[in-house]
């Protein structure tokens, strides 16, 4: 029988703490070059206007009568706000111990709040499913897909909702962060889905799961019970299941 003395317990705690520090430090060193490099690479990439053009289907009409509606939302994000956001110290790329950017989901972001408010007004009287589809259609058609190597000059770079909106573009995880932020702002139970080489979004509506793919550049509906698809079987993340090691990684990244 093995007995644990006070000294053994202290040694074990110190060993675990040291291991977490080393893991977090390694994670910090594999961050992208710097946020300043990403900013310099994308400084001429923003669209020249403050309008977000998007399309959607009007619900509650016969299928054969479906018409695509085109509309716009005006949103002004000052350049200095975008630049300050890009320079903030936070995890911008994942690693072995933290591979999903749920820390950047921000329903309280003022620009997310403005868009959420206008989408809510537009969908007054709609069902929860129809409003959720409208939000998905907004991200699909107002935000263009652009890979990180082209946009930021590096293999991976996670962006905040402010940055994605300012640039009018982003890759799968950037669009997923924005979509989850909008869903959270309007009280939906979002799920961030990690597939091999891809990040997407799920929605839990009263216990029914929907797959919401934001990277389409044309309007697509949510897919009921479709989390397992051609991308594979996802790992499901929420804001409640960040591991201790993951939180340590984020803490160290904020001081990098």
Image: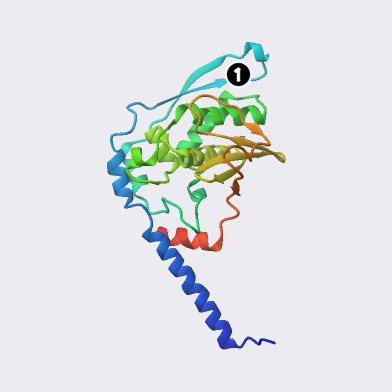
Is residue 138 left or right of 132 when viewed as pictured? left
Residue 13's place in the image compared with 220, above or below, is below
Tell me the residue at 32%/52% (across/down).
Answer: 34
Is residue 59 left or right of 85 when viewed as pictured? right
Is residue 102 left or right of 27 when viewed as pictured? right
Residue 10's place in the image compared with 115, above or below, is below
Tell me the residue at 62%/31% (across/down).
Answer: 222
- Quarter of the picture containing the N terminus is bottom right
**Helix, strand, or loop for circle 1?**
loop
Q: x, y (%) of residue 38?
A: 32, 45
- Quarter of the picture containing the C terminus is bottom left
In the rendered image, the residue lying farthest to the top is 65
Is residue 241 left or right of 153 when viewed as pictured? right
Judge whether residue 188 can be spotted in this image.
no
Which picture quadrant has residue 213? top right
Q: How many marks?
A: 1
Q: x, y (%) of residue 219?
A: 54, 24
Q: x, y (%) of residue 174?
A: 46, 40
Q: Name the residue carrying label 1.
A: 58
Q: Tell me how the rendering is colored.
A: rainbow
Which picture quadrant has residue 171? top left
Crowding at dot 1, Cα within 10 Å, few <14 / some 14-19 / many 20+, comes out as some
Residue 95's place in the image compared with 211, above or below, is below
Identify which residue, 180 or 22, lies in the foreground.
22
Judge whether residue 45 can be spotted in this image.
yes
Tell me the residue at 61%/48% (across/down).
Answer: 236
Q: x, y (%) of residue 79?
A: 32, 37
């Amino acid at each position: 029988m093995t007995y644990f003395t006070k000294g053994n317990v202290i040694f074990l705690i110190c060993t675990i703490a040291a291991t977490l520090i080393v893991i977090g430090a390694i994670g910090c060193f594999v961050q992208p070059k710097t946020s300043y490099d990403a900013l310099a690479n994308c400084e001429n990439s923003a669209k020249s206007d403050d309008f977000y053009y998007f399309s959607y289907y009007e619900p509650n009409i016969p299928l054969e009568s479906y018409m695509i509606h085109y509309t716009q939302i005006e949103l002004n994000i000052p350049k200095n706000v975008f630049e300050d956001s890009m320079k903030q110290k936070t995890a911008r790329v994942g690693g072995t111990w933290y591979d999903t950017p749920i820390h950047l989901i921000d329903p309280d972001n003022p620009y997310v709040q403005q868009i959420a408010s206008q989408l809510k007004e537009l969908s007054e009287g709609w069902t929860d499913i129809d409003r959720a589809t409208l939000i998905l259609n907004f991200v699909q058609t107002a935000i263009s897909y652009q890979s990180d190597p082209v946009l930021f000059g590096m293999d991976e770079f996670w962006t905040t909702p402010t940055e994605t909106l300012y640039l009018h573009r982003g890759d799968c995880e950037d669009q997923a962060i924005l979509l989850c932020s909008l869903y959270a702002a309007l009280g939906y139970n979002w799920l961030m889905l990690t597939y091999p080489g891809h990040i997407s979004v799920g929605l839990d509506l009263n216990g029914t799961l929907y797959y919401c793919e934001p990277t389409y550049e044309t309007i697509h509906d949510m897919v009921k019970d479709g989390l397992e698809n051609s991308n594979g079987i996802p790992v499901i993340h929420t804001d409640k299941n960040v591991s201790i090691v993951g939180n340590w990684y984020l803490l160290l990244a904020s001081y990098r």
